[in-house]
Amino acid sequence: MSVSCRLLIVLLFARVVVAAEPNEVPPPIYDEDAIPHFVLPEVLVCDDGSKVKTADDWTSKRRPELLQLFADEMFGNVPRAAQNLVVTSKVVEEGEVMAGKAVRRQVELLVSRKDGKGQLVLGLLMYIPKSDKPVPAFIGLNFKGNQTIANDAKIHLNPGWVRPSNDGTVVDNKATEASRGTASSRWPVELIVSRGYAVGTMYYGDIDPDFDDGFENGIQGLVKGDSERKLTGNEWGSIAGWAWGLSRILDYLETDEQIDAKHVGVVGHSRLGKTSLWAGASDERFAFVVSNDSGCGGAALSRRRYGESVHRINTAFPHWFCDNYVKYNSNEGAMAFDQHELIALIAPRPVYVASATDDQWADPHGEYLSCYFADPVYRLLGTNGLGGEAPILAPPGPDDPRAIGQIGYHLRTGKHDITEYDWTQYLNFADRHFAK
Ligand code: GTR
């Protein structure tokens, strides 16, 4: 089916235009019939109107311009000064786990300014299956500290600022002992290791604490130093900072002989799914990318305005994206891009997008459509896209991971979360691509 024909079908889904006062966040749409009319930018047409006909057109022209567009208008560019940072690593703890079948390794990545005026300590936790050859790995950031991912008393308790929680796991914005293992259902470490993969994680707040402080702290603050300069409209927001941190983990893994650094996938849930997509788009060393329930600003098409909208996300989380992104509040039609093109930036590498039935805020249908509209790029680059002869417009039903080619997709029954079911699909997907 041609791209224009697919666009027509989407237009048929969309009938009513929603109007709102310029500065007022419109109420979320939860009705397919209420989605505004929209026309998606064509992924295989360059800014100058020329068509992308070959893999080379994509790689040498369209992909670079799209990547720059997302950097300038949405996530923000990493300032050149970040290249002056010096990152060193130190293994700070190591031990056998899982009855000798795996190793737990804790590493500190020390990020320092050359002028000595400040540094950040990023704590990486890894579980690595014992093997006589380097193993592939999944890496991803976590929300509340490495100690939350497993009930393992040896994991260092994160000393930094943590988002508040009233269940005793965080007191005065510091994680407590009670937080140990509280996110273990999201990190089925034993399953991952038993399938032959290492898993590495870092607390996202080590890179940039998740609150709007004008970027005085975290990686943006470190790069800025004591200069009074404010970030410009196209400089990095928090998501770009977190993605930068994921790339530093990969730098380290390239030096770890137990890891097959050519087969490292990046995985993330929710805001960290938005982050894994941007990390995968901006750093082509990531061999595969997983977006779990990433929603608005992640895998979901922005123009649908279904569930969380650009206007709402920029209002609730002004620090996640660059300031230029605010121009698109209730004005998505002015974007020269949409989220299918973020998926396409990962091509031809495997990408997996997952949604959940009760997570309408993240627009499961819009997440699938991004995969659908990224499919032509995957096929142009010689892969089978969403699988089959041609992609299917209707999303698969719950718990039916059948839309699986170089792009994978499933809709899990249940709430906004990342579960063992999700991980099982990601492991199967990685197995298939790494031909194990
Ligand atoms: C929500 C936000 C979503 C998603 C989620 C999360 O409040 O609206 O975009 O990122 O948080 O990260 O848990």
Image (spheres, grey):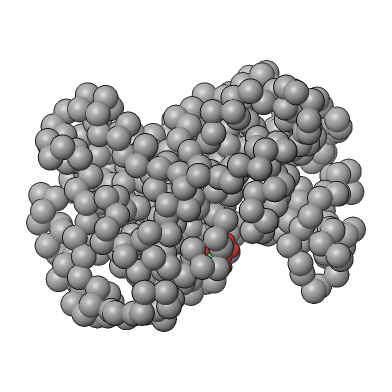
Q: Is residue 396 left or right of residue 253?
A: left
Q: Whole-percent x and y of residue 106?
A: 80, 34
Image-quarter location of ligand 1: bottom right
Q: Is residue 178 left or right of residue 421?
A: right
Q: Quadrant of residue 163?
A: bottom right
Q: How many marks?
A: 0
Q: Whole-percent x and y of residue 329?
A: 39, 65
Q: In the figure, 299 relative to 170: above or below? A: above
Residue at 52% x, 24% y: name it: 262
Residue at 16% x, 67% y: name it: 11
Q: Nearer the viewer, residue 74 or 381?
A: 74
Q: Is residue 312 visible?
A: yes
Residue at 43% x, 68% y: name it: 311
Q: Nearer the viewer, residue 153 or 274?
A: 274
Q: Is residue 85 left or right of residue 319?
A: right
Residue at 72% x, 47% y: name it: 217
Q: Whole-percent x and y of residue 393?
A: 22, 60
Q: Is residue 201 visible?
A: no
Q: Quadrant of residue 415?
A: bottom right
Q: In the figure, 333 relative to 324: above or below? A: below
Q: Whole-percent x and y of residue 157?
A: 86, 49
Q: Is residue 354 left or right of residue 66?
A: right
